[in-house]
Amino acid sequence: MKIDGTPYRSVWVDADGWSVRILDQTKLPWQLDILRLTDAAQAAHAIRTMQVRGAPLIGAVAAYGVALALRADASTEALDRAVAMLGETRPTAINLRWALDRMRARLHNLPADQRVAAAYAEAQAIADDDAETCRRIGEHGLPLLREIAARKPGETVNVLTHCNAGWLATVDYGTALSPIYQAHDAGIPIHVWVDETRPRNQGAALTAFELGKHGVRHTVVADNAGGHLMQHGEVDICITGTDRVTRQGDVANKIGTYLKALAARDNGVPFWVALPHSTIDWRVADGVLEIPIEERSQAEVTDLTGRTADGRLETVRVAAEGSPAANPAFDVTPARLVTGLITERGRCDASEAGLRGLYPETP
Ligand code: MRU
């Protein structure tokens, strides 16, 4: 996707052919800082501190992290150490584990002198696969938006989304935002309600930034506004991304997603979830019981970061001094509240039968 006319992916290999470039998402939308990662520890740091975030993107960056590790030491011990270190960075998004398992399976049985080239090729394949997958998610989500547009000719299609599931959260195009970009490009009049997504404000900072750069009409709303908007007919459809979908179709996503799904059900608003194959955890059935939920720093809740009038980034405390905070970063929306899943292979029910219908090769 483009920022001010320049095409970007969210991760790429530098012109030197080996170091890895990322956009520092902790600085967006205020500054466009491109960081250079030169070892696996830097890749792990970028994932842990959310310089890169979003389920598919952290998988791709972890894959490049393995390649960086092997460049320094191509032994089996170094491979295992890198996979373990990168795998511990964030617990909820299954794409991280998926990418690391894929890297290990590809590299483990190779002679050491072939590993570095193979690691870069595999990481590149993961990144390219994610970009193409997300493009196709857009193609399969677009008909949903076309149907709504056809039901209300000349009127705007209003979508509500939570967190950031756009191109910044993937390698390119995004998951939830991919159909929105395609609808906008096809001339469908579309407007997006962007949940600010406290505590880290991925909606207000990143989704609003992306949509703005692409010229998509949008409005940032407080996280608690969604139910009110749905009661008043201001939302035609909710589309979110996800960090892990269980085989029975339960959906882990950014904290607050579950409440939007409840409000959508109460108001008869369809609630769709967009995901690539790498987000499905076939080993897990009950998402509420089985998906580990990341608990992040209290400071993300008690403090806010923004840009001052004179252009400095500043963090200020908004909670009462001395009050403790809790910060579960994700929640699980049970499959019964999900209208359906949008994947690169098509749409399906949020159920084991639905997922197996699209991925019949899965054991
Ligand atoms: O904590 P984050 O910013 O990594 O959480 C991201 C989300 O919850 C996204 O909605 C999810 O990863 C889907 S991304 C295509």
Image (spheres, rainbow, N blue to C red):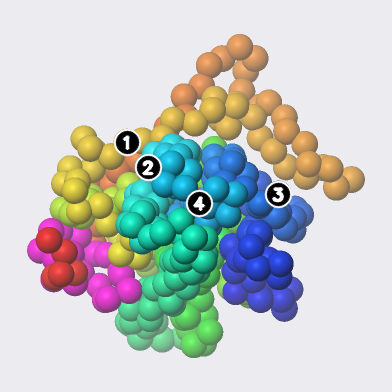
Q: Residue 292 carries which label?
A: 1
Q: Do the residues labelled 4 and 1 touch (CB within 8 Å)?
A: no
Residue drawn 73% across the image and 42% down it: 306
Residue at label 3?
27
What range of the chain is rendered magenta?
340-358
Mark 2 to mark 3 CA distance (whole Å): 23 Å
Tag 3 secondary structure: loop
In the image, is 120 to the left or to the right of 275?
right
Residue 83, numbered label: none
Mark 1 burial class by Cα count in 10 Å: few <14, some 14-19, many 20+: some
User: Mark 1: which amino acid?
Assistant: Pro
**Which mark is first along the chain, 3 or 4?**
3
Q: How far apart are marks 2 and 4 (CA)?
A: 29 Å
Disc assigned to residue 74: 4
- The label nearer to you, 2 versus 4, is 4
Q: What residue type is labelled 2?
A: Thr
Q: What residue type is labelled 4?
A: Ala
Q: Mark 2 near ligand 1 (CB under 8 Å)?
A: yes
Q: Quadrant of the C terminus?
A: bottom left
Mark carried by residue 92: 2
Image quadrant where residue 289 sits: top left
Which numbered mark, 4 or 3, is in the foreground of this view?
4
Secondary element at tag 1: loop
User: Residue at (55%, 48%) from the top-left corner?
Assistant: 73
Earlier sequence position, callout 2 versus callout 3: 3
Q: Is residue 28 magenta?
A: no
Q: What element carries label 4?
A: loop
